[in-house]
Image (cartoon, rainbow, N blue to C red):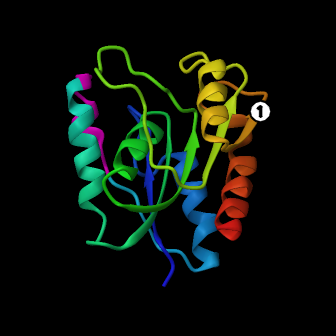
């Protein structure tokens, strides 16, 4: 049985967001099923204390003991890392990762599993140097593209990277 994919959208986005939809589209033909939790009600307050609720909502999607691959963009990447510490995570695919959120007490942490990062050189919200440093410390695969935080010019490329990540696991 293949691991379940949990695809988490970024702050002020939705489960139908472009990037997580593109990831789901490349995963399905490979035989993976996916879940895209909806965090919009939690995001509406803008309260960083609700990050823990976001993490709990993600964790609640995981069938007890089942292997999962977690993927997310921005805040979705951030919470995927923390959730990976609580579930049977076998891989992480993190886009536009913030390694710290102002006002949130904890810096980013994640399980030591195969991890791929995609980040824009011109990310205006999440400094690329911080993502590189985290990836270096983890010896994770990092792909840097000529794009900003939204990675909107590289959605197809990101999806192809995700396909390769799934095939390599």
Number of numbered discs: 1
Q: Position of residue 138 (x, y in %)?
A: 60, 40
Q: With 65 as the anchor, is 14 left or right in this view?
A: right
Q: Is residue 101 magenta?
A: no
Is 41 covered by the magenta stretch?
yes
Point 53% across, 32% down: residue: 97
Q: Is residue 128 left or right of residue 88?
A: right
Quadrant assignment, res 45: top left
Q: Nearer the viewer, residue 76 or 15?
A: 76
Residue 151 seen in the figure: no
Q: Judge whether 19 appears above or below 99 on screen.
A: below
Q: Which residue is found at the position 43% from the left and 41% from the top?
A: 76
Look at the picture and state if 146 lies above or below 87.
Answer: above
Tell which of 57 and 157 is nearer to you.
Answer: 57
Residue 38, can we see it? Answer: yes
Q: Nearer the viewer, residue 133 or 26?
A: 133
Q: Is residue 11 left or right of residue 167?
A: left
Q: Residue 140: where, in percent of width, then height? A: 66, 44
- Assess disc 1: are there few (<14), some (14-19) or many (≥20) residues with their C-alpha within 10 Å of its C-alpha: some
Q: Is residue 25 above or below residue 112?
A: below
- Is 24 displayed left or right of 75 in the figure? right
Residue 25 position within the rendered picture, expressed as x and y whole percent measured from the top left:
60, 65
State the residue at coordinates (29%, 62%): 61
Name the spot of residue 167 as percent of width and height, x first.
Answer: 70, 70
Which residue corresponds to mark 1?
Answer: 145
Residue 62 higher or lower than 59, as above or below: below
Region in magenta: 38-48
Q: Residue at x 53, y 55 (%)?
A: 113
> Where, quadrant-wise, is the C terminus in this rendering?
bottom right
């Amino acid at each position: 049985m293949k691991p379940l994919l949990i695809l988490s959208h970024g702050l002020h986005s939705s489960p139908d967001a472009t990037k997580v939809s593109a990831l789901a589209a490349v995963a399905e033909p490979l035989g993976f099923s996916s879940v895209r939790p909806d965090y919009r009600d939690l995001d509406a307050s803008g309260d960083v204390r609700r990050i823990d609720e976001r993490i709990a909502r993600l964790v609640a999607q995981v069938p007890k003991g089942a292997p999962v691959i977690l993927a997310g963009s921005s805040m979705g990447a951030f919470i995927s890392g923390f959730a990976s510490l609580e579930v049977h995570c076998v891989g992480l695919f993190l886009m536009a990762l913030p390694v710290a959120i102002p006002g949130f007490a904890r810096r980013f942490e994640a399980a030591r599993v195969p991890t791929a990062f995609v980040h824009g050189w011109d990310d205006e919200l999440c400094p690329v140097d911080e993502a590189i440093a985290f990836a270096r410390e983890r010896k994770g695969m990092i792909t840097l593209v000529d794009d900003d935080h939204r990675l909107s010019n590289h959605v197809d490329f990101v999806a192809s990277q995700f396909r390769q990540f799934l095939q390599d696991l």
